[in-house]
């Protein structure tokens, strides 16, 4: 579930990056890279888990699926928080600069 949730977030952010004319202003490429990196990490986790457990990997209880789903949502949320921090630091429209140095 974690892999699936991060891949969905990566695809959505990539589509938003592709169709948005202000992709550089809002650093949507950075958001896409965050999610694609997380997806790659979870894919490698899947490969090694599957190599160890084989078919037993797909036999999971409800609590395991729920834990994986919550972890996936946490990863997506932390990716959004990291993107927002980057956006505040870069301040592409100068909003924070205007507010902080207003005289």
Image: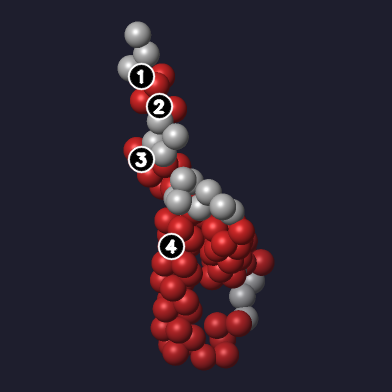
Marks 4 and 1, the one that precedes in the sequence? 4
Residue at the spot x=38%, y=44% of the render? 86
Report which quarter residue 85 is drawn in.
top left
Marks 3 and 4, the one that precedes in the sequence? 4
Tell me if 63 is positioned left or right of 27 in this view: right
Marks 3 and 2, the one that precedes in the sequence? 3
Spot the residue most to the right.
62
Residue 79, can we see it?
no
Cα distance in 3D space between marks 1 and 2: 6 Å
The crowding category of the residue bearing disc 1, from other C-alpha atoms within 10 Å (few below 14, some 14 to 19, many at least 20), is few
The correct choice, above or below, for 71 with respect to 97 in the image is: below
The kind of secondary structure element at disc 3 is: helix
> Answer yes or no: do the residues labelled 1 and 2 have beta carbons within 8 Å?
yes
The crowding category of the residue bearing disc 3, from other C-alpha atoms within 10 Å (few below 14, some 14 to 19, many at least 20), is some
On the image, the x and y values in percent for residue 79 come to 46, 52
What residue is pinned by disc 4? 33
What residue is pinned by disc 1? 100
> Answer yes or no: do the residues labelled 4 and 1 have beta carbons within 8 Å?
no
The kind of secondary structure element at disc 1 is: helix
Depth check, front residue: 17 or 38? 17
Checking the image for residue 96, the label placed there is: 2
Spot the residue most to the top.
103
The label nearer to you, 3 versus 4, is 3
Residue at the spot x=43%, y=87% of the render? 52
Depth check, front residue: 101 or 40? 101
Cα distance in 3D space between marks 1 and 3: 14 Å
Cα distance in 3D space between marks 3 and 4: 17 Å
What residue is pinned by disc 3? 90
Tell me if 37 is positioned left or right of 77 in this view: left
Residue at the spot x=35%, y=40% of the render? 90
Marks 1 and 3, the one that precedes in the sequence? 3
């Amino acid at each position: 579930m974690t892999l699936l949730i991060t891949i969905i977030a990566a695809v959505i952010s990539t589509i938003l990056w592709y169709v948005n004319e202000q992709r550089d202003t809002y650093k949507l490429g950075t958001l896409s890279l965050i999610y694609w990196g997380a997806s790659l990490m979870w894919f490698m986790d899947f490969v090694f888990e599957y190599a160890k457990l084989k078919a037993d990997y797909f036999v999971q209880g409800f609590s395991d699926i729920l834990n994986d789903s919550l972890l996936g949502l946490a990863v997506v949320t932390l990716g959004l928080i990291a993107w927002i921090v980057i956006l505040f630091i870069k301040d592409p429209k100068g909003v924070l600069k205007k507010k902080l140095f207003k005289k």
